[in-house]
Amino acid sequence: MKILITGGTGLIGTALRKSFQQDNHEVVFISRKPDQASGSTKAISWEINAIVHELSDTDVVINLAGTSISGSNPLLMRWTPYRKSLILSSRLEAGKLITEAIQLSSNKPGVLIQASAIGYYGNTGSDPVDETNLPGADFLASVCQEWEKSTAPVESLGVRRVITRIGLVFSEDGGLLPLLALPFRFFIGGVIGSGNQVLSWIHIHDVVQAIKFLIEQPQTQGIYNLTAPNPVDNQAFAQSLGKTLNKPVWLPVPAIIFKLGLGEAATLALDGRQVFPTRLLEAGYQFKYFTLQPGLDNIWRKP
């Protein structure tokens, strides 16, 4: 099987590439700097003719491309008007280019996996949410709606399209988890804000395996939440993280500190979303990391 990935150098894209290659699949990813790509994976540029050429024998397209919402550097997390524009435009441009390339290609991929995020639902507090819920009204919700629409035209071409609304991805290699763990490593970790906000998390292993599952199941299409079946509030998360790292959990970190430092981006830490993977479970996917503590222990207590 040949798989074309956009956003192949990000956290999820990198994990997918490694897993597909271990399964002896051919992987090609699209990069702004293909000549600087490392490893054995083939990289091509974001040039329409190059993409159309690669699609001639491609079975699967996975569209993950987009500027990081959280950023790897806390100093870059603040959502300035420029950064908000980049977060949206990078996703729309990638989706539209992939759509155009598929329209021009004589060979259509069997399936397109379109990434999205549970930010689609907005701040839902402790209310349970699944794929049937309507979108929220904040910045992230609007980004996710437009992101999902960007590749919708491929459905009229006979391409099976699967939208994955991905939760907070836990991995040692990137994402928010290393940033959330940093205070604990310096013995100043604690509950964020009220501690009542719900985190809908997922281990990177299950992100990869769920996407592979959705590719392999021809009856799957439409929207799937990629979150573990057992979301936790921030109080429980802090206690579990402290236990994994063998570090104490101190007094709560006031919400105002995040709001002053991050502005609107503080919603990433302060808003709650209790999201459930209803359709994924109904389709038959079996999670390896069903609950939080084993997932955290796997990441940081490896032998």
Image (spheres, helix red, strand yellow):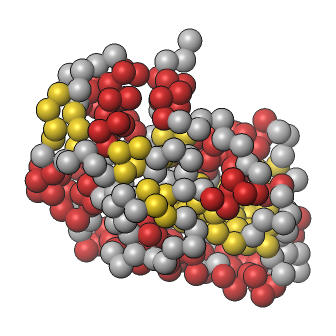
Q: Is residue 76 above or below residue 176?
A: below
Is 140 situated left or right of 216 in this image? left
Is 202 situated left or right of 136 in this image? right
- Quadrant of image for the C terminus: top right
Is 163 situated left or right of 28 in this image? left
Q: Residue at x 76, y 44 (%)?
A: 20
Q: Looking at the picture, how far across and down is residue 53, in whole percent?
A: 81, 70
Q: Is residue 102 above or below residue 183?
A: below
Count of numbered labels shown in the rendering = 0
Q: Residue at x 32, y 25 (%)?
A: 242
Q: Quadrant of residue 78?
A: bottom left
Q: Is residue 253 above or below residue 167?
A: above
Say whether residue 41 is visible. Answer: no
Is 54 situated left or right of 224 in this image? right
Say whether residue 270 is visible. Answer: yes
Q: Looking at the picture, how far across and down is residue 156, in whole percent?
A: 78, 87
